[in-house]
Image (spheres, rainbow, N blue to C red):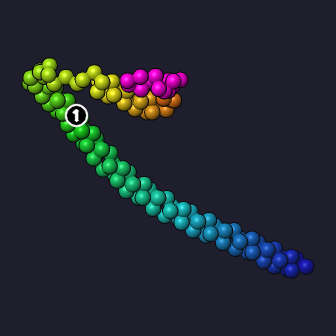
Amino acid sequence: MNGITLMASIAVGSALMGCAYGYTIRDNAAKANAAKAYKAAEAQRVKMQEQLNDVSAKYELERERAGQVSVERTQTVKEYYKTVPALDATCAVPPAMYGVLANAVRDANIAAASEPSSKLPDDLRAALPGN
């Protein structure tokens, strides 16, 4: 019996060692695959970071350039209006036309502010010119 028990013990021990070795090989293969995936992800991250850096550099360059253009345009407009001669009094807008323009500006501002426009007079005939 000792021989059979010894053989059975060796067989069970061999099977257990085989399973453990198989799991070790499988575990090492999984670790290798994970390392490959990590390296690929890191390479992709580096590439995307380079693209982001390029876009950021272009943005900063354009922002600086736009700031210079804005300053130049503002200075040019100010210089232009400094050199324009004053208008003659005969070029003034008639009061009726000024009222139309002022009302149009007011209505546009009210519309832009999403507020209700001014109320109509109760008696429309009284508001008409000549009445």
Q: Quadrant of the N terminus?
A: bottom right
Task: Name the side, left or right, on which 57 lies relative to 9.
Answer: left
Give the residues in magenta: 118-131
User: In the image, what residue occupies the spot 46% across and 22% down?
Assistant: 126
Of residues 98 and 96, the one nearer the viewer is 96
Q: Quadrant of residue 97?
A: top left
Q: Which residue is mark 1?
A: 70
Against 32, residue 120 (above or below) is above
Disc 1 secondary structure class: helix
Q: Quadrant of residue 93?
A: top left
User: In the image, what residue occupies the spot 83% across and 77% down?
Assistant: 8
Task: Name the side, left or right, on which 103 lies relative to 7.
Answer: left
Against 49, residue 124 (above or below) is above
Residue 95 visible? The answer is yes
User: In the image, what residue occupies the spot 24% across and 42% down?
Assistant: 61
Q: Position of residue 29 (x, y in %)?
A: 57, 68
Of residues 113 and 105, the one nearer the viewer is 105
Residue 68 visible? The answer is no
User: In the image, what residue occupies the spot 9% across and 23% down?
Assistant: 85
Q: Position of residue 111 (x, y in %)?
A: 45, 33
Q: Position of residue 11 (x, y in %)?
A: 78, 77
Task: Name the side, left or right, on which 5 lies relative to 27.
Answer: right
Of residues 113 and 6, the one nearer the viewer is 113
Q: Position of residue 43 (x, y in %)?
A: 41, 58
Q: Quadrant of the C terminus?
A: top left
Going by the numbered disc 1, the residue's amino acid type is Ser
Most common SS among magenta residues? loop
Question: How many numbered discs?
Answer: 1
- Whether residue 103 is in magenta: the answer is no
Against 19, residue 120 (above or below) is above
Task: Name the side, left or right, on which 42 lies relative to 60.
Answer: right
Of residues 30 and 24, the one nearer the viewer is 30
